[in-house]
Image (spheres, rainbow, N blue to C red):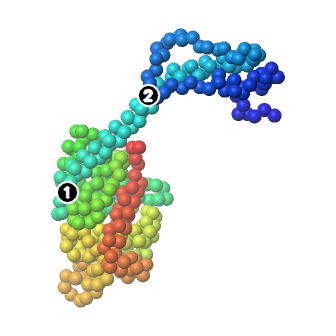
Amino acid sequence: MTSTFSYLPPCNAAAAAVSSSSLRHYLKPKVPALSSPSTVPFRSKTAINCSPPAHADASVQTDFCFLKKREFVFSAALPFLLILHESVEGFRAEAAELDRSEDERIREEVRKVVTKVRAPGLLRLVFHDAGTFEMNDNSGGMNGSIIHELNRPENKGLKKSVKILEEAKSKLDLIRPVSWADLIAVAGAEAVSICGGPIIAVELGRLDLGKPDPEGKLPEESLDAVGLKQIFSKKGFATRELVALSGAHTIGGKGFGSPVVFDNAYFKILLEKPWSSKGGMSSMIGLPSDRALADDDECLRWIKEYANNQNVFFEDFQNAYIKLVNSGAKWKR
């Protein structure tokens, strides 16, 4: 039975008489050295030596000549193939370098408009754009749709943050258009960093949706811990990630330490439960959803962990933030 991988036809008795050493001598490819340029002119008609062993029969002579022609074509084309390969690799390297430089330009322009005072609003903008994501139908998410949703009651006050980013976007669009989704994701990361939080590397290349997401997708401030865990689960986030992301309320003047310092004060104050004391401004600290976390055993486990170890909180927040700004995103490449 003939193998499907055989290339030459089966040899007859006469062909078998040809010594293996003789065939190796004639069939060994003569590939030119890579460092030497080809001396074969384009479209040349260089003669090809098709002389097989004199004692070989006609079928071997035909196969031998065919292989010699293949050898010649390969030898002539090899320098051009190497040049093409080097050109493609060079193009890829240059494209990657261009992407890196353009990405850094986006970050530089965003840094110019981000301040500690503006940081809470810019971070809130991220949550309200990405927070519409739903796993079941892969809708919503980090897609810039918040630009078309600013008149909704839950987005009150975010027009100011969008106005801040418009300054950076107008300059960037003159060089290369940048999506709102990318701009908002980077602005949120810079807001965290400028307030002393972790440095978050945000991948760029998101596309904008160009229209609003459906209403009623954001978690409500009045939800208890069970409701929060259910809605975050639908968005693909575990309880640990829910608690870590809630730590963003450490800035913004909600009563969890300094309004412009990103640290783990949020969790320390949740453990103290100052709102349980009678009278005073302590009853105004945080949102109902913040206070609900401290009354849930599963959430309390992570609140204690982050209150005792700020580094763990920073690492978990960084990972959860990246997951948040990638949720539902559509990418250019």
Q: Position of residue 94 (x, y in %)?
A: 34, 37
What residue is drawn where x is 66% and y is 26%? 24
Which residue is under mark 2? 35
Inspect the image, locate mark 1, and give the three-letter code of the amino acid beneath it. Val
Inspect the image, locate mark 2, and give the three-letter code of the amino acid beneath it. Ser
Q: Nearer the viewer, residue 273 or 71?
A: 71
Q: Nearer the viewer, residue 53 or 205?
A: 53
Horizontally, is 38 left or right of 284 in the view? Answer: right
Check disc 2: other Cα within 10 Å, few if <14, some if 14-19, many if 20+: few
The answer to whether any part of residue 91 appears in the image is yes
| Label whose residue precedes the other's in the sequence (2 or 1) | 2
Q: Nearer the viewer, residue 138 or 91?
A: 91
**Quadrant housing residue 161:** bottom left
Which label sits on residue 114?
A: 1
Q: Position of residue 132 (x, y in %)?
A: 38, 59
Tag 2, which secondary structure? loop
The vertical placement of 316 against 133, above or below, is: below
The vertical placement of 38 against 239, above or below, is: above
